[in-house]
Image (cartoon, coloured by chain):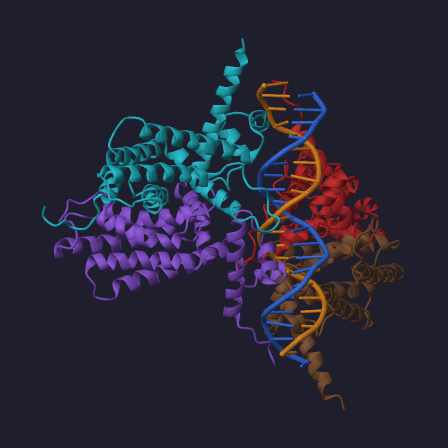
Chain colours: A brown, B red, C purple, D cyan, E orange, F blue
Amino acid sequence: MAPKRVDRAARREDILDAAVRVFARRGYAATRIEDVAAEAGIAKGSVYLYFEGREALLAAGFERIAQRSAQVLADARSGDRPADEALAALVEGAVAMLAAEPDLTAVMLDLWSAGGAARRTGEAGPPPPAFDIAAVYREYRTLVAELLRRGGSEGALRPGLGEPEAAVVVAAIEGCLLQWLVDPSVDLARLAGPITATCLDGLRARPVG
Amino acid sequence: MAPKRVDRAARREDILDAAVRVFARRGYAATRIEDVAAEAGIAKGSVYLYFEGREALLAAGFERIAQRSAQVLADARSGDRPADEALAALVEGAVAMLAAEPDLTAVMLDLWSAGGAARRTGEAGPPPPAFDIAAVYREYRTLVAELLRRGGSEGALRPGLGEPEAAVVVAAIEGCLLQWLVDPSVDLARLAGPITATCLDGLRARPVG
Amino acid sequence: MAPKRVDRAARREDILDAAVRVFARRGYAATRIEDVAAEAGIAKGSVYLYFEGREALLAAGFERIAQRSAQVLADARSGDRPADEALAALVEGAVAMLAAEPDLTAVMLDLWSAGGAARRTGEAGPPPPAFDIAAVYREYRTLVAELLRRGGSEGALRPGLGEPEAAVVVAAIEGCLLQWLVDPSVDLARLAGPITATCLDGLRARPVG
Amino acid sequence: MAPKRVDRAARREDILDAAVRVFARRGYAATRIEDVAAEAGIAKGSVYLYFEGREALLAAGFERIAQRSAQVLADARSGDRPADEALAALVEGAVAMLAAEPDLTAVMLDLWSAGGAARRTGEAGPPPPAFDIAAVYREYRTLVAELLRRGGSEGALRPGLGEPEAAVVVAAIEGCLLQWLVDPSVDLARLAGPITATCLDGLRARPVG
DNA sequence: GATGAATGAGGCTTCATTCAT
DNA sequence: CATGAATGAAGCCTCATTCAT
């Protein structure tokens, strides 16, 4: 029916794979279309047969990340666990997903930068990018806040928790991600446990109970 | 005989101020030297009298941030508080510092991106930038880990805490910073409390004690 | 699938032709890449598809001259003439070659200047250019000195001639070239005879023999 | 009467000295006004108190050379020698003058280049420089041709010599100069003898007479 | 006069994008 | 579809010249 459709989509993915690899290596700003083409083993002009332009590659990278995020969120919602366990699962899922695809994750650095620049549209700057990382974190916070509130009413978590604490949990994940991205000596994969433990049980010594 | 007197250092600061404002508004990648000059109210070429080039402006921004960071760390070390209090003070100090200078802080986005790109210098890329954001986080983690260990031996904090937990604490700060930078609806200044509370006491309900 | 076919070498030559014309007209220092592009009938940026940059054009011009020189030297070596005849043939060959391509020859002015400036690299100047005009004259002198010595042993030329006299012969050629380049009223093509006559037989009246 | 006049002229000379040194070292094209000022030990702007602009420095260099040339020509004219001796004296004088001031002489390279570029004023190029090196060689040739003709009528030189041979003699000088400028291994000072010997008596063996 | 900070035109080079083959 | 040569807008940086002190 549409025999070429499959090829076309696959080729698009190949190019995006290549782009993600190069972005991870050199950063988006320093990556030329030609670099992506070379990495993908095709000609420069061919990239434009599959992507609108340079920024579309970054946007596509964002889409991939957004998909993975959505999956993580969906996984965390599924299952019928107590809130604290769901929270731990969410943290683990997110960290595992991020650590599993280091190149794709590295693109986050550029997305933050590009997205942040679009933040304040005061003067006549370039049009804001077609992706909204803020929304991703918003969704995370929303789910976490939901879990926190649920956990509060169920008794597993403190009562009164909400958005601020949700932001902190999300921050713990993203902050570890950031340190990992910026410093190879930080091992993200091993931080899921400490994140969960710290956020759930805190660092303070407990009265012997 | 009567050389024109100009306070070079002050002028340099003025230009850097301008650069930081523009970087915060448009992002480093989208900022042209001319934008900085315009913001500073001088001619394009004059920027080069005080800075080597575009990247030197970013590096100078980094220096400012590094200075602020060093100050925060120094403040946290001073004082003779118990570890948990020192930790809370560190978080508060860092958040206050960051929130106090939103433009400067926004430059972090670009520093992460630029610094991250330099991370993996496999192929023949441009020479890595002259700043090392990783070192900043390393210092934070080192201090926090120190406090955690001290707190452990003093009994105020759990025993056995170390680098991983330090990374989580630093992550909580930087992750909140990130969410703030990327999403204006997040209010960093109000997150210092939740960060401290969450990290120190956790989110789980305590057995009535 | 159907890659556009372009004879890169030929296109490169075309651009070099254009560059040589413009260099001859305005001088290297006053020639902008855009001038070359306009002369070649292409866009500014296209020049960079074939040449590294401005100086590469000059270096390519040097290569052309060096090739012509090598040909002249080879021609002079071939043939089995007495030394004095070979010398005359060399002079004629060199002058004919130079006069035949006035534009290319005019580039010598810039090569002398550029090459001379590179001579004394005491302080931190830019790296010396990739061409060595001195070598060209060295080769000429070497061949001429060879002929002079051969002519001496054969009896056609004075005995004891060597490098200094070779330098004078080469100088006679290059000096005429210089005057021609600097003053259009000097006709290089007609100076081959006087050069040969003067150098071989001198200007002094001979005792009637 | 004009106490400052002397100082002013002396200062001007100092700056020109400095300029000549730098031109010799880096070439005119690569020399910035600031380089000259630094070499002279004054401020950039002060150069403009003594020279119209950058090109005026080169023109002043030309003037110096023209003066030296005029002196050489005058010396050669004075004295009441036979033509062949006068010719030898001219060559020696010219070579001695050039070899005595290597830096000033090195500027010739740039003068040739700049003067040559002005040669062909076809399109809308920059206005031709305010100096005319062609004229210098013209004067040399004129004097030499005069001597040749005189020598011819006096019997010391061949009859029928004229402008072409004059060009060759001048070429022998300037060509040696060129080789020296371009190749430090050529020793100009020692070439005066060979130039004279070659041009006057030729290279060919004489019939025993 | 002297200074050197400031200016801004000018030229180099890069690279996203187009398009003829 | 694929290619890669060509384009030209954009931005960096230099430096001759000016001018307020």
Residue at the image position 28 percent from the left and 49 percent from the top: C169
Can residue B147 be seen here? The reply is no
Q: Is residue A16 above or below residue B173?
A: below
Residue B152, position in %: x, y? 66, 46
Residue at the image position 52 percent from the left and 49 percent from the top: C27
Q: Is residue A8 above or below residue D36?
A: below
* Residue at the extreme bottom of the image, as rendered: A1
Residue D124, position in %: x, y? 62, 49
Residue at the image position 30 percent from the left and 64 percent from the top: C75
Residue B121, position in %: x, y? 55, 57
User: Which one is in front, A91 or A119?
Assistant: A119
Residue B102, position in %: x, y? 78, 43
Task: Give left or right: position of B182 versus B73.
Answer: right
* Residue at the extreme front of the image, as rendered: D153
Q: Check the picture and name the quadrant holding the N terminus of chain C.
A: bottom right
* Residue at the extreme left of the image, as rendered: D208
User: Which one is in front, B68 or D125?
Assistant: D125
Task: Give left or right: position of A198 versus C116.
Answer: right
Task: Give left or right: position of C126 versus A8.
Answer: left
Can residue D123 be seen here? The reply is yes
User: Which one is in front, D154 or D188?
Assistant: D154
Residue D177 appears in which quarter of the rendering?
A: top left
